[in-house]
Amino acid sequence: MPFNPSKWHFEIDDYLNPWIPAAPWKHLPSPIARFMGHRPEHQPPLGNIAMVFWAFIGVLCSLIIIQAVSHAIPSFEERGAPIIIASLVSSATPPFPAKAKPYLPTRLYGKEETCTANTVSQGAAAVLEFYAIESPLSQPRNAVIGQFFASVIGVAVRKLFALSPQSQEMTWLGGSLSCACAVAVMALTGTVHPPAGATALLAVVDEGVARLGWFLLPVVLLGCVLMQAVALLFNNIQRRFPVYWWTPAEVGHRLRHRKAQQREERGGGVRSDSEYENGSENGAKLEITSTRHLEEGRAAVDEVKLVITRGHVSIPDNLYLSPEEKLFLEELSERI
């Protein structure tokens, strides 16, 4: 086999999805399942005026709630943890230099030395999670786990560079490395979330954020969880959010197989219908089929075929599809 790194491909979901349990929302009462993003039928399209209205309400309410909760937590005030004021700071605003801090009113920030922290990343996240809600970048897996990875990487890089006596002069390099590492980790783990890049950068280059150290993690995660909760409420009134919680592909088939084996070993007899249910959160079953088989003692490769029937999509194992493409095919199979 020729050495060709340009064709290397790593998909972490191939290893995780068989062991990830399927979302249980379809087993919950209908009103609760609706606000978890589950729909038994296809969600009809919505006009852009209504979309803008709900995005406006969602962004406004989410940032107000995050700001109010941040004010109410004593540990945030004690450490001067920045609160979420993304409505006041543009996502294009650079972090304030340490020697040129503008006056920031205490009644808004809790402490005068507090700067930006989550401001840029949460402001950009609000756009994704209340307007571009069908984008894979705004789904819960990306929005929460992506921010977590970025926060960990940002704090770790900042502390690593702090060991050098020239750390102040090397801040620009640390910020670049932090953002680059965060992008790489998010890409390999399927958790790409653009606002998280700002989190990783600010954790290194912004003195107000860097002072928090590892306390930045609960600050960021609290903002993410609160924004997701508000998004679930407002985005499911006339729209659907999230489109999926983990991935549009099938999940949990190894768990179902193991459960079926245990049932047979206990003498449970015939498997229940629930053990045959697919793990896709969108209703359709996405199956990977093998294109290789033995023919007269030699390996033969079948013709590549993509089969779509009602509620079922069959994909050859040598064809790579992005999560967006898999989601499109699943939705298409439900409309046949």
Image (cartoon, rainbow, N blue to C red):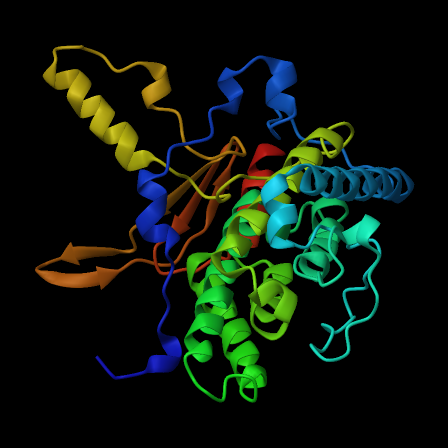
Number of marks: 0
Image position of 153 with respect to 238: above or below: below
The quarter of the image holding the N terminus is bottom left
- Residue 298 drawn at (x, y percent): 12, 63
Q: Is residue 303 above or below residue 55?
A: below
Q: Is residue 174 visible?
A: yes
Q: Residue furthest left?
A: 297
Indicate left or right for 259 with 330 as reference: left
Q: Nearer the viewer, residue 205 or 239?
A: 205
Q: Is residue 82 above or below residue 231?
A: below
Q: Residue at x 63, y 34 (%)?
A: 335
Q: Nearer the viewer, residue 273 or 124?
A: 124
Write the residue at 39% across / 25% down: 277
Compared across the picture, whether 175 is left or right of 255 comes to: right
- Inspect this view and state whether residue 224 appears: no
- Toward the viewer: 331 or 77? 77
Q: Is residue 42 above or below residue 302?
A: above
Residue at the right extreme? 49
Would you say 95 lies left or right of 202 here? right
Q: Residue 200 in the image: x percent, y percent?
A: 56, 66
Quadrant assignment for the C terminus: top right
Q: Which residue is depicted at the point 52% across and 46% down?
A: 141
At which x and y percent is residue 2? 25, 83
Q: Position of residue 8 (x, y in %)?
A: 35, 73
Q: Is residue 331 left or right of residue 184?
A: right
Name the residue located 34 percent from the left edge and 81 percent from the top edge: 5
